[in-house]
Image (cartoon, rainbow, N blue to C red):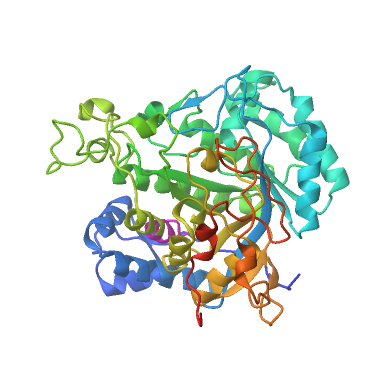
């Protein structure tokens, strides 16, 4: 491992200047330097007034101030979905199955351990393990699973169990405690002792209550989600935060979501950092993928006979910056969606880098947006390309399966003007690819990477499954992985 200090952003909160004009160069310079913090109102002003390219340049400047000009990272991990049985009925999800469904599954220990073993064999360092919320699995099942993983693979970082899973653990196991926080603590501590290393930010979606009630039936509230993460931070675990946008929400809802992450991060740093507590290490956002989902059958704004596209999108009417909007504010709220394309994605990601001044990493979402936009995202505030995955089930179930192997992810990073580097879960560089033996520079014939399909536990009809190449994953559609910008070719 390269000797590198642990990622760190100064714990002092930048000052806000609510009266400042976000278009003022001096204020932008202070924001880039981490000396000024934008308010929610200023963030909305940036969204409305700043051209996309200018917003990207501003976010890129901020990213370089934090991460430097040279290195951009990725991780080799495996996304293991141990069960698709789930008590929630999220309208945006195509992955979940009811208990007893014909294609419902829960993986056996040996199957799970084999997946970890295959990861280790290709140099992977981390598993991202999440599932549906299966009421038939007792707490001891999870404790034994973690114990066996850590015993057999002590060098593998276990990044597992999102906040909604923990809330259902509380509901299923009825642990001791007078408050939700105490109950979560009672469930989480034995999992940490068994080998849980950090928590992923799954299930964040959008925090605003009006949106959450519409799209996440049976899923925990924003307060519960944030409480689980607070408990993890108190136990010394680092976590990530996420946002899924581009459906019924408004831009104000996205900014409110960012604001909640920043507020709770402020508290974690102030309260826990002196004693070695955890915090949000990363933020990743991605657009809703509509295929095969109930929410995807909702009409897009402008498709309805009575839609007046000269008027604001219903979500923007309801999406107040403080998250207090209610569905009564617009009769079509929740009945129309506004999908997010590349422009909206890049703008949202750039805004997240500028707003989350206390979060270390912003991840590019190439899995949903494709390799080209994932590469461009490195110039819009992202410092990390995420995972060279061996497996993905949830996003794939919703119709999107973009895949990259290690040489390709390195190639994209290098062609964006940076040095690719493999990292661990704490964002420490394990291997920077300087020389000719780098995964991408060592390739002589790129046509050899047109091979295999992404591994899925339940592939869609007509698609292949299974992938365990030395380089991570590839797509069943060869053009999806070879049609990338390459210098000199």
Q: Is residue 260 visible?
A: no
Residue 357 x, y percent position in the rendering: 46, 60
Quarter of the figure that contains the N terminus? bottom right
Residue 142 x, y percent position in the rendering: 75, 31
Q: Nearer the viewer, residue 121 or 202?
A: 121
Does residue 260 appear to the left or right of 179 in the view shown? left
Q: Residue at x 47, y 50 (%)?
A: 368
Does residue 25 appear to the left or right of 451 in the view shown? left
* The quarter of the displayed image where residue 373 is located: bottom left
Q: Is residue 419 magenta?
A: no
In the depicted structure, whether residue 268 falls above or below residue 22: above
In the depicted structure, whether residue 400 falls above or below residue 422: above
Does residue 245 appear to the left or right of 336 in the view shown? right
Q: Residue at x 49, y 67 (%)?
A: 484
Q: Residue at x 38, y 59 (%)?
A: 346
* The quarter of the displayed image where residue 260 is located: top left
Does residue 269 appear to the left or right of 435 in the view shown? left
Q: Is residue 340 visible?
A: yes
Q: Residue at x 50, y 52 (%)?
A: 284
Q: Is residue 355 magenta?
A: yes
In the depicted structure, whether residue 364 falls above or below residue 458: below
* The quarter of the displayed image where residue 460 is located: top right
Residue 147 x, y percent position in the rendering: 83, 38
Q: Nearer the viewer, residue 426 or 125?
A: 125
Residue 423 x, y percent position in the rendering: 67, 63
Give the magenta part as a residue range.
350-357
């Amino acid at each position: 491992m390269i000797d590198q200090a642990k990622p760190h952003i100064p714990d002092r909160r930048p000052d806000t200047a609510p009266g400042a004009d976000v278009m003022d160069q001096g204020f932008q310079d202070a924001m880039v330097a981490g000396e000024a913090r934008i308010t929610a109102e200023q963030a909305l002003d940036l969204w409305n007034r700043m051209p996309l390219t200018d917003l990207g340049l501003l976010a890129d400047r901020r990213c370089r101030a934090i991460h430097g000009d040279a290195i951009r990272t990725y991780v080799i991990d495996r996304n293991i979905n141990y069960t698709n049985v789930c008590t929630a009925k999220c309208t945006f999800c195509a992955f979940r199955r009811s208990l007893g469904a014909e294609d419902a599954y829960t993986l056996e220990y040996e199957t799970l351990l084999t997946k970890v073993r295959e990861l280790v064999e290709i140099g992977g360092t981390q598993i991202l393990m999440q599932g549906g919320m299966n009421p038939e699995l007792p707490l001891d099942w999870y404790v034994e699973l973690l114990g066996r993983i850590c015993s057999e693979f002590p060098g593998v970082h276990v990044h597992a169990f999102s906040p909604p899973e923990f809330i259902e653990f509380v509901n299923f196991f009825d642990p001791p405690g007078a408050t939700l926080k105490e109950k979560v603590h009672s469930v989480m501590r034995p999992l940490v002792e068994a080998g849980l290393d950090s928590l992923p930010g799954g299930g964040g979606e959008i925090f605003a209550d009006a949106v959450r009630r519409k799209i996440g039936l049976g899923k925990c509230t924003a307060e519960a989600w944030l409480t689980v993460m607070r408990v993890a931070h108190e136990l010394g675990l680092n976590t990530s935060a996420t946002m899924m946008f581009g459906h019924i929400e408004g831009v104000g809802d996205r900014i409110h979501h960012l604001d909640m992450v920043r507020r709770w991060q402020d508290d974690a740093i102030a309260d826990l950092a002196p004693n070695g507590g955890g915090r949000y290490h990363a933020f990743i956002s991605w657009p809703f993928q509509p295929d095969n989902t109930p929410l995807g059958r909702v009409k897009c704004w402008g498709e309805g006979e009575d839609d007046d596209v000269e008027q604001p999108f219903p979500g923007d009417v309801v999406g107040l910056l403080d998250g207090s909007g209610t569905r009564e504010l617009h009769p079509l709220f929740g009945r129309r969606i506004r999908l997010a394309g590349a422009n909206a994605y890049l703008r949202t990601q750039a805004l997240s880098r500028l707003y989350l001044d206390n979060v270390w990493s912003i991840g590019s979402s190439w899995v949903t947006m494709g390799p080209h936009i994932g590469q461009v995202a490195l110039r819009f505030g992202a410092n990390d390309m995420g995972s060279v995955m061996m497996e993905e089930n949830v996003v794939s179930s919703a119709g999107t399966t973009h895949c990259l192997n290690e040489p390709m992810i390195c190639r994209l990073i290098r062609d964006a003007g940076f040095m690719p580097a493999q990292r661990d879960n704490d964002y420490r560089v394990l291997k920077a690819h300087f020389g000719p033996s780098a995964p991408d520079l060592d390739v002589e014939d790129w046509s050899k990477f047109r091979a295999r399909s992404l591994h899925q536990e339940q592939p869609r009809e007509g698609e292949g499954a299974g992938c365990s190449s030395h380089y991570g994953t590839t797509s069943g559609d060869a053009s999806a992985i070879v049609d990338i910008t390459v210098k000199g070719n």
